[in-house]
């Protein structure tokens, strides 16, 4: 019978221990994701001042005169603003997500737009759409400002009414005028994007400790003047997407919105 010495037995135990240790799986170390600093943000208010030329817009009771001498009163003035973008001096942009606003002259609460969570920085320009982009026109039932029950919607085929101007004029054949402007399909795409300039090189300074304000005038007369001069006797209605809506959209895209001044606040 073969006999093992004490030294041989100790060596065998050592080898077995090493083998067991070598097969033991190392504990997995998961990589960590660097968090980095949180982006600082601020807010912006956009105040919309509805006017007719240099005169405040007063619904129903105030009579105004066009440059061609037509008299008129306004009973309704609604419009959509959407897809707001702020531009920095280096050309980069902040695009506000889900920015769709319905402004109604008769509702003062809609005349101030509160833009939140804007990255801190110096901004030199603003861009927005007058109307509703084509994607939202075909996205089915919407909520909030885009709710069809707001009265700014034709049908799933024609989509949203971008701008609505109604009132009375003694020069109109029926004594009234109605302009409902919309359409997102070519050749009658009335969506217009504008970039009203900041005056005298002004900058919009977004900071964490104060909320600046853009004061913007919205001139109803610009719908009636421009590339097309509107005379109520011959052009008193536009009720659907089409060539007349395009004429009015081209008019108001040429200067209905003007940045009057910026408050630092």
Image (tube, rainbow, N blue to C red):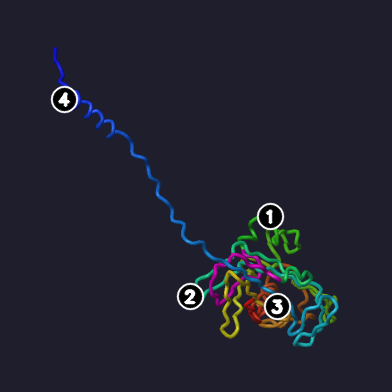
Label disc, if present, on residue 7 of the rendered structure? 4
- Which residue lies under the disc numbered 3? 218
Please, what is the dominant secondary structure of the magenta stretch? strand
Magenta stretch, residue numbers: 112-133
Label disc, if present, on residue 39 of the rendered structure? none
Query: Along the polypeptide, which appears first: circle 4 or circle 3?
Result: 4
- Name the residue: 70% across, 62% down: 145
Q: CA distance from mark 4 to mark 3?
A: 100 Å
Q: Is residue 127 above or below residue 34?
A: below
Is the residue under label 3 in contact with that under label 4 (CB below 8 Å)? no
Q: Is 131 in the magenta?
A: yes
Dot 3 falls on a residue whose secondary structure is strand
Q: Tell me where residue 51 sits by quadrant.
A: bottom right
Of residues 14 and 254, the one nearer the viewer is 14
Dot 2 falls on a residue whose secondary structure is loop
Query: Along the polypeptide, which appears first: circle 1 or circle 2?
Result: 2
Q: Is residue 221 left or right of residue 32?
A: right
Query: Along the polypeptide, which appears first: circle 2 or circle 4?
Result: 4
Quarter the C terminus occupies: bottom right
The residue mark sitting in front, 4 or 1, is 4
- Which residue lies under the disc numbered 1? 141
Q: Sort mark 2 into few (<14), some (14-19) or many (20+) by Cα contacts within 10 Å.
A: few
The residue mark sitting in front, 2 or 4, is 4
Of residues 245 and 42, the one nearer the viewer is 42
- Which residue lies under the disc numbered 2? 90
Give the residue at the far left of this rendering.
2
Q: CA distance from mark 2 to mark 3?
A: 28 Å
């Amino acid at each position: 019978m073969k006999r093992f010495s004490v030294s041989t037995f100790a060596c065998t135990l050592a080898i077995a221990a090493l083998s067991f240790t070598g097969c033991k799986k190392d504990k997995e170390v998961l990589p960590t994701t660097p968090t980095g600093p949180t982006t600082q943000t601020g807010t912006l208010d956009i105040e919309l001042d509805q006017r007719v030329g240099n005169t405040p817009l007063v619904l129903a009771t105030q009579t105004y005169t066009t440059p061609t001498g037509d008299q008129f009163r306004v009973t309704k003035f609604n419009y959509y603003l959407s897809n707001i973008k702020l531009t920095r001096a280096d050309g980069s942009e902040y695009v506000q997500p889900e920015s769709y606003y319905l402004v109604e002259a008769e509702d003062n609460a809609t005349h101030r737009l509160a833009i939140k969570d804007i990255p801190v920085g110096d901004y030199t320009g603003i861009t927005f759409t007058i109307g509703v982009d084509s994607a939202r026109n075909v996205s089915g039932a919407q909520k909030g400002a885009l709710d069809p029950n707001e009265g700014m919607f034709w049908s799933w085929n024609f989509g949203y009414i971008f701008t609505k101007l109604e009132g009375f004029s003694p020069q109109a054949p029926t004594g009234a005028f109605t302009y409902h402007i919309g359409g997102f399909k070519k050749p009658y795409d009335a969506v217009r994007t504008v970039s009203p300039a900041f005056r005298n090189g002004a900058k919009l300074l977004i900071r964490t400790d104060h909320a600046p304000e853009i004061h913007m005038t919205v001139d109803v007369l610009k719908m009636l003047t421009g590339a097309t001069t509107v005379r109520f006797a011959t052009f008193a209605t536009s009720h659907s997407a089409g060539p007349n809506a395009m004429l009015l959209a081209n008019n108001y895209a040429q200067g209905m919105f003007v940045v009057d001044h910026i408050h630092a606040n």
